[in-house]
């Protein structure tokens, strides 16, 4: 039974609207929820609305080039795909569909540890995409999101598998020693449907217990900086720490030698009441200035102007979580391509209207906090 009429989607908001009409309530609640009062979930988007752009004019913006590099790899755009668990809840093709859309767009995708398609099958799907020899030199890029498991043998085996499969970085999520309390999931006793599996593992209990209980049984809450150093010591892959929100932790991450930081509050799903990521970004950037650490951001990015604001404040890239799930729910691979293309086109237009032809043209003067003109400050 359809709950609301479908829209012909021309924005991420339209894709979200449509997902609300098509997804089963358990999956929809799991995807859309934030923790507790969902204050941070709301603030992630609201904080972008509190920023104002400062465009430059008369700069010949007839050609806009969004190519950039991430840890030395050239990609078509700083718009990337965040890791989200259990994508087959949105569409049966799940992670394979996302990988194909990412590969087609030559964008970076982070695969979740808790994917419903294995790391090997996902990257293989991306490789099957017809080869487009564009002059830009950009290529698809696949990174793997790692939770550190209580069982370090399982953790190490997973690292070996993803190295072999061709993933180019490990993104260690550090804000989930326990799963945040998402009230709708508690009420729904949310768990993975019986016909799906956490495809990177052979755990049987994932289908019997609630997700929160499963996480407690697997993820190591003793995780600390020495474990990040341990991961670095056993792999040559660069390490990205996902879930940093403060200058203090950004400094520790740089001291530990990580290659990059992803400023994230897990889409408002973990500790409710933390800062919106776009508001936390400046202190993180300031803390690691000159230390050679790339800084990315996720949370609440829904429009091309959000991407422009994040880059103007100093982020090297932005990652999309829920928008990809809404695209998947809309139309599988085509839907993810649509989500990526919509925001990519919005970003290119925003760049042109702000007087930017390439990523390096975007700078701190293109954005300000609040609505008061500089002359009145
Ligand atoms: C349904 C869902 C599942 C997620 N699963 C994971 C995960 O497995 N690992 C992880 O590091 N982050 C996970 N995240 C967090 C995202 O990587 C990302 O930080 C967040 O979704 C960004 O916010 P946005 O959804 O507002 O774009 C998940 C987020 C959602 C919405
Ligand atoms: O739901 C999530 O946000 C998430 O990150 C997660 C963590 C562990 C298992 C599955 C999903």
Image: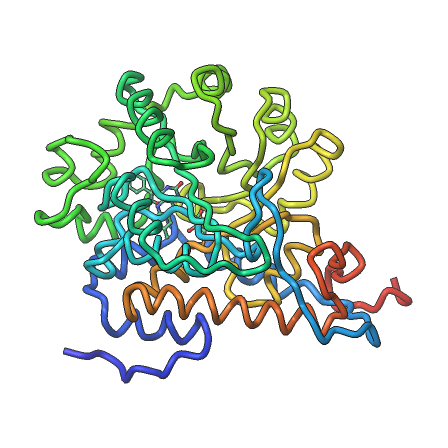
Q: Is residue 198 left or right of residue 170?
A: left
Please tell me which residue is depicted at 23% across the width and 35% down the height of the picture.
200
Image coordinates of residue 279 in percent, x first then y, are 63, 50
Q: Is residue 245 left or right of residue 20?
A: right
Please tell me which residue is depicted at 38% across the width and 29% down the height of the picture.
163
Q: In terms of image quadrants, where is residue 295? A: top right
Q: 39 or 45, which is in the foreground?
A: 45
Q: 119 or 366, which is in the foreground?
A: 119
Image coordinates of residue 346 in percent, x first then y, are 57, 72
Q: 117 or 100, which is in the foreground?
A: 100
Quadrant position of the C terminus in the picture: bottom right
Quadrant position of the N terminus in the picture: bottom left
Please tell me which residue is depicted at 65% across the width and 27% down the height of the picture.
251
Q: Which quadrant of the figure shows ligand 2?
A: top left
Image coordinates of residue 98 in percent, x first then y, are 34, 56
Residue 217 visible? The answer is: yes
Please tell me which residue is depicted at 58% across the width and 50% down the height of the picture.
317
Residue 39 visible? The answer is: no
Image coordinates of residue 55 in percent, x first then y, are 77, 70
Q: Is residue 349 above or below residue 145?
A: below
């Amino acid at each position: 039974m359809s709950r609301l009429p479908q829209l012909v989607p021309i924005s991420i908001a339209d894709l979200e609207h449509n997902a609300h009409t098509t997804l089963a309530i358990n999956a929809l609640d799991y995807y859309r929820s934030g923790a507790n009062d969902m204050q941070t979930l709301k603030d992630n988007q609201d904080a972008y609305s509190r920023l104002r752009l400062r465009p430059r004019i008369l700069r010949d913006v007839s050609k806009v080039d969004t190519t950039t590099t991430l840890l030395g790899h050239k990609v078509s755009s700083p718009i990337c795909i965040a890791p989200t668990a259990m994508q087959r809840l949105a569409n049966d093709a799940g992670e394979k569909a996302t990988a194909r859309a990412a590969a087609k767009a030559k964008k970076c995708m982070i695969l979740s540890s808790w994917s419903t398609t294995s790391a090997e099958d996902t990257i293989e799907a991306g490789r099957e995409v017809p080869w487009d020899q564009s002059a830009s030199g950009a290529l698809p890029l696949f990174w793997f999101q790692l939770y550190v498991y209580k069982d370090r043998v399982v953790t190490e085996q997973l690292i070996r598998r993803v190295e072999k499969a061709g993933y180019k970085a490990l993104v260690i999520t550090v804000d989930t020693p326990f799963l945040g309390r998402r009230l709708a999931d508690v009420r729904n006793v949310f768990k993975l449907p019986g016909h799906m599996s956490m495809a990177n593992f052979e755990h049987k209990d994932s289908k019997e217990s609630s997700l929160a209980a499963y996480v407690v049984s697997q993820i190591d809450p003793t995780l600390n900086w020495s474990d990040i150093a341990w991961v670095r010591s056993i792999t040559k892959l660069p390490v990205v720490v996902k879930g940093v929100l403060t200058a203090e932790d950004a400094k520790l991450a740089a001291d530990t030698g990580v290659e990059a930081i992803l400023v994230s509050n897990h889409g408002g799903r973990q500790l409710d009441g933390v800062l919106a990521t776009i508001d936390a970004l400046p202190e993180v950037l300031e803390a690691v200035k000159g230390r050679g650490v790339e800084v990315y951001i996720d949370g609440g990015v829904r429009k091309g102007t959000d991407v422009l604001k994040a880059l103007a404040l100093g982020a090297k890239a932005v990652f999309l979580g829920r928008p990809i799930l809404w695209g998947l729910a809309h139309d599988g691979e085509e839907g993810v391509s649509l989500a990526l293309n919509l925001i990519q086109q919005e970003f290119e237009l925003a760049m042109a209207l702000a007087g930017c032809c390439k990523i390096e043209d975007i700078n701190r003067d293109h954005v300000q906090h609040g609505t008061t003109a500089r002359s009145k400050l």
